[in-house]
Amino acid sequence: MEIATTDSPKKIKKEYLALVILTLLVIVFYGNTLKNGFIYDDSQQVIENVYLRSLKYLPKVITGCTWESAFGGCKDRAIYYRPIQSLSYLLTYQISPQPWVFHLVNLFYFLAIVYLVFLLAQTLTDNFLFSFLSAFLFLIHPVNSETVSWIASVPELTFAVFVLLSTIFYLKYRQTNLIKKLWLSALFYFLALLSKEPAILLPVIFIFIDIILFNLKPENYLEWEKLRDYLIFGGLAILYLIMRLAVLGHIFSQGKSPYAPVSWLERVYSFFILFSRYLKKFFLPEPLVFFHFFEKRTNFFNPSFLAGFGAVFLFFLAVIFAFKKKKNLLLFSFAWIFLFLLPVMVFIEAAGESVFSERYLFVPGIGFSLAVSYIISYFWQKEKKMRIWLFLFLIIALIISVNSVLRRSQYWHDNEKMYTKTLSQNPDATPIRFNYAVLLRNEKRDFAAAKAQFEEIIRRKPNWGDMPLIYLHLGDYYQEVGNEQKALEYYHQSVSFSDDWKTNFAYDRLGVFYAKKENYLMALIYFCQAVQINPDSKDNQAHFNQVISLIDFNYGSNPTRLYQEISEGKSFSRSAKEGIQFVDKVCQERTCSFLFSPRFEANEVILPFLIVAANEKKEGIKIENPVFNPQINQVIINLDGRYEKDIITFVFPTCEGVYYEASTP
């Protein structure tokens, strides 16, 4: 197989026919996805995403993240920075918010990818059979059905589009030495980075291309022209990382993973298990499951690990064979498979709970299709007697694949079908069970069934990462059925996960509960903590402001009552610490200034509008506009001069539900 150089009219006609056939096959395989709705993550990423509803949010494509609307922010909450996904959603939404339009966009992406696989194979060789088979095998592989059928898989699709374009133009640059081809390759590389994180490894593929296809020697990498090429890609990678850092507040994933922390032994074990399972999925895609089970272990002598080790060993034997026999195109295909699977095999904590997912095979599947196409093309040309068997193999593969894909598409019609099917295949698919419970509660209004599903999660996965939400929903259930005591119990269990920002929902629920009971001070404590955890939530902020107004209305003219409510422990409890120390009293004419030195923890929040004082007779004194001077770390409270000779006790309530007390001598 030689690098392509010319295009004859006959060849062009044959290529157009191939593209027509591929188009028809895409319609046959995936045309019925247009009948499907929004599934799973689609709800929060599309339906509930306020940043898709107008082009005025276009800047959010760069400055925000896909989950910003759902999470109430990106920094320290989201783990993905994928502007192309946000842009695709935004532009599609402007056409129509209907699910069929989003599915149609996915079909266009997939069709473009199939064409580009054909073009990549054609750019690599001048062999039409190899090019057509590469695109054909990629198109019909059932493992791709998840990516094509699921709207939220747009990052996989756009990632594939731009990786293919970047690679094709890099090959053309090497073939023609035209610098504009290099710049186009770099442009598409940057767009691939903005689509999905593993694109950062693409320049390694280019190194393979240079070495195994264009025979570059080590000394060539010392030449300025070659260094310049890679500096361009390196500079774009750095730019992407800076953008990611600015939006997310981190470069590497900071999401809560059920597999973190991961020891080196566990990482090695996982590498062999995952790689072998992915290789097996290429050859035996059934059963197609949305959520696969994975368990990190270090038992290197169990049968699963030994079988996985054997499969990986055979893969690298094939790599060595291709290298020794100078089967460069096959070697390129193996490198593609390995490189684009590498991130999910090594950084397993970055994948959340979906450590093994069929969609992660989408881009590596391009390399698999190239490799299988190479082998079939080789025997087709060398062994004419095998052609009938190869043809029968392709026909059988087509029939089996279309049946598998069409059958699976039925399960992607709506959430209920997808959830129940997935749970029947994997009862430990906890995120799916959670979403199914929410569906039962919110859409089916079957509260008892939803409660049973939430309790099943507690039974199966008591340490699941989103347990605050489980207890939140159970609290809501008991609130709805009128069992307030049980509701409070579950809300308090939800907020007990103090390291999770999702506890803000339960804090807000507790605030609403006490506000309805007209216990506004207790409500304030919970609303304040909700705001502290999630200051970007408009609901939290609104509830906090409303209860402040209610407190002012009820206590503003009665500081004695406010002092008693706080100091008697009805809502706030007195701290044993000396968090506030009286420093001095300065009186001038009609005003006395009382100076205090705060000594509380940095994360504690004093509620200045609740600071109140009382004289020896326990008569409340309203405090107006206390002043904090951070330069000298002092709180200054001004009172009427008539209190100059009184012993006054001041209370300083905090957001945490405690108060500090300080008295004048």
Image: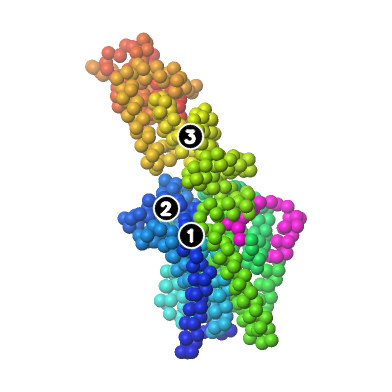
Residue 170: give x, y in percent of width and height: 48, 75
Q: Residue at x 70, y 52 (%)?
A: 298
Q: Earlier in the sequence, mark 1 or mark 3?
A: 1
Q: Residue at x 46, y 52 (%)?
A: 43
Q: Earlier in the sequence, mark 2 or mark 1?
A: 1
- Asked whether residue 291 is drawn in magenta, I would say yes
Residue 201: give x, y in percent of width and height: 53, 65
For discs 2 and 1, the disc positioned in front in the rendered view? 1
Q: Earlier in the sequence, mark 2 or mark 3?
A: 2
**Marks 2/1: CA distance?**
15 Å
* Residue 609 sits in quarter: top left
SS assignment at label 3: helix
Q: Amino acid at mark 1?
A: Asn
Residue at mark 1: 36
Q: Quadrant of the N terminus?
A: bottom right
Residue 40: give x, y in percent of width and height: 50, 53
Residue furthest to the left: 589
Q: Residue at x 27, y 17 (%)?
A: 640
Does residue 413 sit above or below 334 in this rendering?
Answer: above
- All told, the count of numbered labels is 3
Residue 637: give x, y in percent of width and height: 32, 23
Does residue 156 sit above or below 260 in this rendering?
Answer: below
Residue at mark 3: 480
Residue furthest to the top: 617
* Residue 600 sits in quarter: top left
Residue at mark 2: 47
The magenta segment is: 288-312
Q: Amino acid at mark 2?
A: Ile
